[in-house]
Image: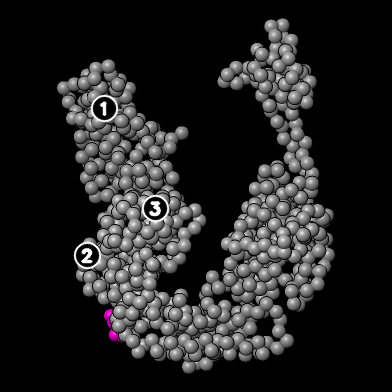
């Protein structure tokens, strides 16, 4: 077994590009190895801003052998009546590079055919890699790529060297003007020279000696350890921030944490402001005491070992002091104008050229939120009305202008300082939730209602003016906002109909929409359908159970969830298979027929009467459960129909020649199918 080492050395790649690139590189190499029948034990992808690295161990030096079977003409054509090969057999054998005697006979559904079975020897892996690896590099996708010099190839940043070894030998290939070799480079400043590499172990050892920690997880652990050590020296500990840790780890090759401090006077600012100032602009880690209160210290992570850490710390402190001084100024100035007085100022802020100003958006979401709260928690209507008028006010504050990520946060702070009720302040903050996929959801009804209204106005407005997501392009984050609405509705178990909400939103947008309202409504509903399907599938529900539930309606997301869950649970019962087969048979045979009344006088067999009686008795109980949205219990009741259904199909011919008898039997089955369709379309359920 051998090992493969590939290092792509580049100019500094943006930190956000690297994690995704490493995942892709690993997946691409696995796919290439599988395609070429090259076995391996493990593949790892590592990287820093200056290098993307693949390491594969336990790689077979030669492709696995494979046997190829090529079917030729039919036996009757290949051999004459005396068993002698015809020109067809001779030509086929010659074309396959074998003798006629080596031909074999195989039996197929169409009869007997001649066949050539050949063994294909494996190629040496090292001879295949010059084809595999350039293709792999060109297949890595980045948010943005660039070209350099007059070369045709592109990459995240210009490539400066390629290290490529297989079993200790250089794999010769080229990308642009760079040829692969056995040289790597150390840290840009602390060990900038090149060095030869013998194998994987030698590579990792030489990198460490050259001030490069190539393993991102190792860098993260190192940063955490050193930051916590620095915090403990001032009786504090790290404010948890996994996203910042991920970002910083891909900004450096050799992390050097340096602790600094800032004036205690700035602790009078809201904690979110201080953390944002340190995090967003400077990439500093914050520290808190045992009670969770912010301490006047921070930790910066440098990419080089400074001669005097104190000098670097002072420099960072000066930068942060200026940033916090600005924040303090904005904080004081912003409070001179109460949040409610900023509403008028939103008339001068263009939300979107086709959808009007931020003031107009506030008016729309205010009316939509008022409609929502009326059916959810009417006793909180006053809170929603007030919060809806204030929720966008912080967009024109100096603080949010300086720190855009604090929108909603500062709205909550300024609402409190303006003397607004705590419920109003909370709703202002929560109407932006969830901020990311899977993020925290609003805890209050006013916050949830405002969030739904705000997001729905954006979604319907964008669809209304033709700003519809295509492929991976979704500049207005409509997918995330749609999922946000669904998550809120499901978590709060709101009894809402999407179609009704869309109609209200379309009416409020009025003349701003540029497409027929029904067309917009249909497109948005289908957009919601896709997001709900993906969400339910991601929750571990059977895809066919989800599809069956969606097929009969998704206007009520909570109802959809309950039906899909009930169908999924039904699939887990031991005797599900015959039960599903019976249900599907009922649905499939009756789906194209018009329902009619069942005439018991036309029954010719006792099994018809027994099924009709079972339908009446079981259908009533199941209907009660369905009206209560207790779909699991309803399905348990409906499962009792299996035996009379089986006996019905065994006892009569549904498609009888007599039209009236046939119609009567189909009408009975349609009534049973209609019970199923209140939960799901059983024709979508898969059975073996």
Q: Earlier in the sequence, mark 1 or mark 3?
A: 3
Mark number, residue 527: 3
Cα gap from disc 1 to disc 3, whole angstroms: 36 Å
* Residue 41 appearing in the image: no
Residue visible at 36% across and 46% down in the picture: 550
**On the image, which quarter does residue 551 sit in?**
top left
Mark number, residue 666: 1
Residue 641, x across and y down, in percent:
29, 33
Residue 526, x across and y down, in percent:
37, 50
Disc 1 vs disc 3: Cβ atoms closer than 8 Å?
no
> Closer to the camera, 303 or 558?
303
Task: Give the secondary structure at mark 2.
Answer: helix
> Closer to the camera, 387 or 466?
466
Crowding at dot 3, Cα within 10 Å, few <14 / some 14-19 / many 20+, comes out as some
Residue 203, x across and y down, in percent:
78, 64
Residue found at the very far top of the displayed protein: 82
* Residue 434 appearing in the image: yes
Q: Which secondary structure dominates the residues rendered in magenta?
A: loop
Q: Specify start and end residues of the magenta stretch as a single range.
A: 418-422
> Closer to the camera, 358 or 317?
358
Crowding at dot 2, Cα within 10 Å, few <14 / some 14-19 / many 20+, comes out as few
Q: Earlier in the sequence, mark 1 or mark 2?
A: 2
Residue visible at 74% across and 51% down in the picture: 58
Task: Give the secondary structure at mark 3.
Answer: helix
**Circle count:** 3
Q: Which residue is mark 2?
A: 374
Left or right, 115 with reference to 498: right
């Amino acid at each position: 077994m051998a090992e493969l080492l590939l290092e792509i050395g580049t100019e500094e790649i943006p930190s956000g590009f690297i994690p995704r690139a490493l995942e892709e590189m690993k997946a691409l190499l696995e796919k290439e190895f599988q395609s070429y029948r090259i076995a391996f034990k493990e593949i790892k992808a590592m990287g820093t801003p200056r290098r993307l690295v693949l390491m594969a161990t336990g790689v077979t030096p030669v492709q696995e052998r494979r046997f190829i079977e090529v079917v030729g003409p039919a036996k009757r054509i290949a051999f004459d009546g005396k068993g002698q090969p015809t020109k067809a057999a001779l030509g086929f054998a010659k074309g396959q590079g074998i003798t006629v005697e080596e031909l074999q006979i195989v039996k197929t559904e169409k009869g007997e055919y001649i066949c050539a079975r050949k063994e294909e020897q494996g190629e040496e892996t090292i001879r295949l890699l010059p084809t595999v690896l350039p293709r792999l590099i060109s297949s890595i996708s980045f948010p943005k790529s660039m070209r350099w010099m007059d070369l045709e190839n592109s990459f995240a940043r210009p490539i400066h060297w390629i290290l490529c070894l297989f079993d200790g030998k250089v794999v010769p290939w080229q990308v642009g003007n760079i040829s692969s070799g056995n040289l790597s480079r150390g840290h840009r400043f602390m060990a900038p020279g090149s060095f030869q590499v013998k194998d994987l172990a030698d590579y990792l050892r030489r990198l460490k000696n050259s001030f490069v920690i190539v393993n991102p997880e190792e860098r993260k652990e190192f940063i955490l350890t050193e930051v916590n050590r620095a915090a403990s020296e001032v009786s504090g500990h790290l404010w948890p921030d996994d996203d910042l840790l991920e970002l910083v780890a891909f900004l450096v090759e050799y992390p050097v944490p340096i602790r600094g401090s800032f004036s205690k006077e700035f602790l009078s600012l809201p904690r979110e402001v201080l953390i944002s100032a340190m995090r967003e602009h400077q990439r500093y880690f914050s520290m808190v005491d045992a009670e969770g209160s912010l301490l006047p210290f921070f930790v910066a992570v440098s990419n080089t070992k400074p001669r005097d850490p104190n000098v670097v710390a002072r420099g960072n402190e000066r930068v942060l002091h200026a940033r916090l001084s600005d924040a303090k100024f904005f904080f004081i100035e912003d409070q001179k104008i109460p949040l409610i007085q900023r509403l008028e100022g939103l008339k001068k802020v263009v939300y979107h050229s086709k959808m009007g100003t931020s003031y107009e958006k506030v008016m729309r979401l205010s009316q939509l939120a008022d409609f929502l709260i009326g059916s959810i928690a009417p006793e909180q209507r006053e809170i929603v009305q007030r919060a809806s008028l204030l929720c966008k006010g912080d967009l024109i504050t100096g603080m949010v202008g300086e720190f855009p990520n604090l929108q909603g946060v500062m709205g909550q702070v300024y609402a409190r300082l303006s003397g607004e009720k705590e419920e109003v302040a909370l709703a202002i903050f929560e109407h932006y939730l969830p901020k990311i996929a899977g993020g925290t959801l609003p805890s209050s009804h006013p916050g949830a209602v405002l969030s739904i209204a705000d997001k729905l106005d954006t979604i319907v407005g964008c669809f209304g003016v033709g700003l519809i997501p295509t492929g991976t392009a979704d500049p207005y984050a409509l997918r995330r906002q749609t999922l946000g609405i669904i998550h809120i509705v499901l978590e709060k178990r709101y009894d809402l109909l999407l179609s009704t909400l869309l109609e209200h939103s379309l009416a409020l947008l009025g003349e701003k929409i540029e497409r027929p309202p029904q067309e917009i409504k249909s497109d948005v509903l289908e957009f919601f359908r896709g997001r709900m399907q993906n969400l339910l599938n991601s929750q571990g529900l059977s895809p066919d159970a989800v599809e069956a539930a969606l097929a009969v309606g998704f206007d009520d997301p909570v109802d959809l969830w309950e039906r899909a869950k009930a169908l999924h649970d039904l699939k887990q019962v031991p005797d599900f298979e015959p039960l599903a087969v019976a249900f599907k048979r009922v649905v499939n045979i009756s789906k194209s027929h018009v329902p009619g009344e069942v005439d018991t006088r036309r029954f010719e067999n006792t099994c018809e009467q027994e099924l009709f009686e079972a339908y009446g008795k079981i259908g009533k109980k199941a209907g009660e459960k369905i009206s209560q949205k207790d779909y699991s219990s309803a399905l348990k009741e409906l499962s009792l129909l299996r035996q009379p259904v089986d006996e019905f199909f065994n006892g009569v011919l549904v498609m009888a020649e007599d039209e009236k008898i046939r119609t009567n039997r189909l009408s009975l089955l349609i009534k049973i199918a209609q019970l199923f369709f209140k939960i799901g379309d059983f024709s979508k359920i898969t059975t073996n």
